[in-house]
Image (cartoon, rainbow, N blue to C red):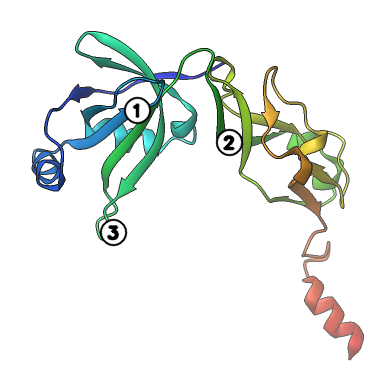
Amino acid sequence: MTAVGTLRVEPRNNSGRGASRALRNENKIPGILYGGNKENVLVTVDPRDVMKGLHHAGFYSTIFELNLNGKVEKALVRDVQFHPVTDNPIHIDFWRVSKDSKIHLSIPVVFINENKCPGIKRGGVLNIVLHTLDVTCLAENIPEQITVDLEGLEIGASVHTASIALPKGVVVTHPERDNTLATIVPPTVQTDGSSAAETTESSAS
């Protein structure tokens, strides 16, 4: 199910560096809404909403409903620019979407059933290679996360994009790459408490 959120936004008239600097001094973040074969709209955003959103993994895959002059525009956050010193957000780009919009975006990957993974039970370690996956889907089919089931995997097993079940209407953007999402690697510590490196050194002496 596509996540839907709201941000406090207002239209603005002035553009340029001076106007943007003045807005930041007023504790507002300048931004722009574009796409959808419509005119660009200059906006300001409440920085509290942006900072809160940035702390959530699905910020860039959430469709936000922006209320501008009484009209609701649905949009994705396409880019956030940050100050090089303070690292505070200083500009935000929104891209209009409709239910028929076909989009490319990165979705968080979540791993489940570690307690049902024989490899982990035997001391193996889950080595996550990709924390997000690039997918293509319609705006109304954006998943909140990609779920990977670890049940039954042994040490040495790997999970590839070609082997996971994706939500309906969602496809991997680059299926030809068949990227590795995670592997179950052998333990680095022996059962007697000594490390693998220590065991090797002891055998060599």
Is residue 178 visible to the viewer in this orientation of the structure? no
Say which mark, if any, is on residue 107.
none
Residue 108's tag is: 2
* Picture residue at 26% right of the left edge, 48% below the top: 88
Provide the residue designation for mark 3. Answer: 84
Going by the image, does 10 lie left or right of 50?
left
Q: Secondary structure at mark 2?
A: strand
Kindly report the distance in space between the C-alpha atoms of the residues bearing marks 2 and 1.
25 Å
Rendered residue at 31%/11% (across/down): 72
Q: Residues within 10 Å of mark 1 (few under 14, many from 20)?
A: some
Q: CA distance from mark 3 to mark 2?
A: 26 Å
Which quarter of the rendering shows the C terminus?
A: bottom right
Mark 3–mark 1 Cα distance, whole angstroms, equals 25 Å
Q: Earlier in the sequence, mark 3 or mark 1?
A: 1
Q: Amino acid at mark 1?
A: Tyr
Instruction: Name which residue lies at 72% across and 25% down.
Output: 166
From what the image shows, is residue 106 above or below residue 71?
below
Give residue 106's position: percent from left, percent from top: 56, 37
The image shows residue 33 at horizontal and vertical percentages of 31, 27
Going by the image, does 90 lie left or right of 165? Answer: left
Q: Amino acid under label 2?
A: Pro
| Picture quadrant of residue 38 | top left
Q: Is residue 89 above or below residue 186?
A: above
> Which residue is disc 1 drawn over?
34
Give the residue drawn at x 55%, y 34%.
105
